[in-house]
Amino acid sequence: MTSYERLLAAINGDFPDRPPVAPEIFGITARLNGYRISQYVTNGRIIAGSQLKAREAIGYDILFAFADLSVEAEALGCTLRYEDDAYPSVNEHILQNVEDVKGLKLPDPLKDGRMPVVIESCRRLRESAGNECVIAACVMGPVSIASQIMGLEDFLYQLVDNPDGINQVLDFTEEVAISYGRALIRAGAHCPVVFDPVASPAVIPPSLFVHYEARRLKRMYDSFRDEGSRISWISIAGATQKIIPYFKKTGINLATIDYVVPIREAFKLADNIALNGNLKPYSFVSCSPAEMKEEVRRCLMEAEGKGNYIIGSGCEVPVESDIENIKAVVEAARDFKY
């Protein structure tokens, strides 16, 4: 099986030849190829080249067109703070009053901010890898984009005190996410991964996820499928047990789960959608390769031989990680027999 066939088989509920390996490997690929993070997040050629070389050296089953979590916010006009060897972060928000969202312009993914950088990385990855493996592009979810352009504290207050205004903001940020995600698919991505860290129960109550976010995710995934995506992937960190039961209703067929969510419990809640993750991200830094293999075996045992479990990290693999630990995860997957 190719990596693409392996991942699609797991998502479709079939048994692949072995468990797919799809950890969230982003900035570490820059470090492995001698680049600083600041170079990686601003250059589509470097993103694509770093991703391709890292996958060739390690052997996992995924490629990511990803810069950082502030791409959409910057394209909308937020000022970012750049550092030499760390991800940029929002330094200045653009929305001081929710009513002012009516004056914001939808960014052009081909022109605004660093959206063109990530789109270039998609094109390069697809030109090089074709359909041999899944090329996943990363899109921020509506709630997280809103929190970035408003500031998290103000967003959380307004979420409770001004629901009408927040709905207007979220309608706009949903449109931003859809427009960017569709452009990434047209550029060569097989699917967008929707990252929405602010939608985690660690930040907002599950009831607000259901009220504000779920229907917007459904519209996003419907739109991405119309553009050709066969994978509807969500990645929300933290203890997500109370929102996992809503995933399938939104059209999600692949969810990344964090290490704090037991795999057996997640499968019971997920209604047969495929699950990815559960390896503790810091283990890639702190463990030995032998310990990493044991962690993979634990995950596979907890998944009880289900073909729709994909080995991965519950969040991004840290840039300080030991490459031998990532190789150990791939080796453990290759040794596994259903």
Image: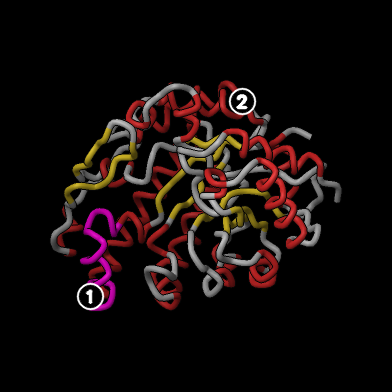
Q: What kind of element bears circle 2?
A: helix
Q: Quadrant of residue 84?
A: top left
Q: Mark on residue 162?
A: 1
Q: Are marks 2 and 1 in contact (CB under 8 Å)?
A: no
Q: Nearer the viewer, residue 122 or 32?
A: 32
Q: Nearer the viewer, residue 157 or 50?
A: 50
Magenta region, residue range = 146-162
Q: Mark on residue 129?
A: 2
Q: Which amino acid is tagged 2?
A: Ala
Residue at the spot 40% in from the left edge and 24% down from the top edge: 35
Q: Residue 11 appears at what percent x and percent y?
A: 69, 51
Relative to 101, does residue 128 appear above or below in the rendering? above
Residue at the spot 39% in from the left edge and 28% down from the top edge: 40
Q: Residue 99 appears at what percent x and percent y?
A: 16, 64
Residue at the spot 62% in from the left edge and 34% down from the top edge: 324
Q: Nearer the viewer, residue 225 or 321?
A: 321
Mark 1 or mark 2, which is nearer the start of the sequence? 2
Q: Quadrant of the N terminus?
A: top right
**Is residue 245 toward the left or the right of residue 203 in the image?**
right
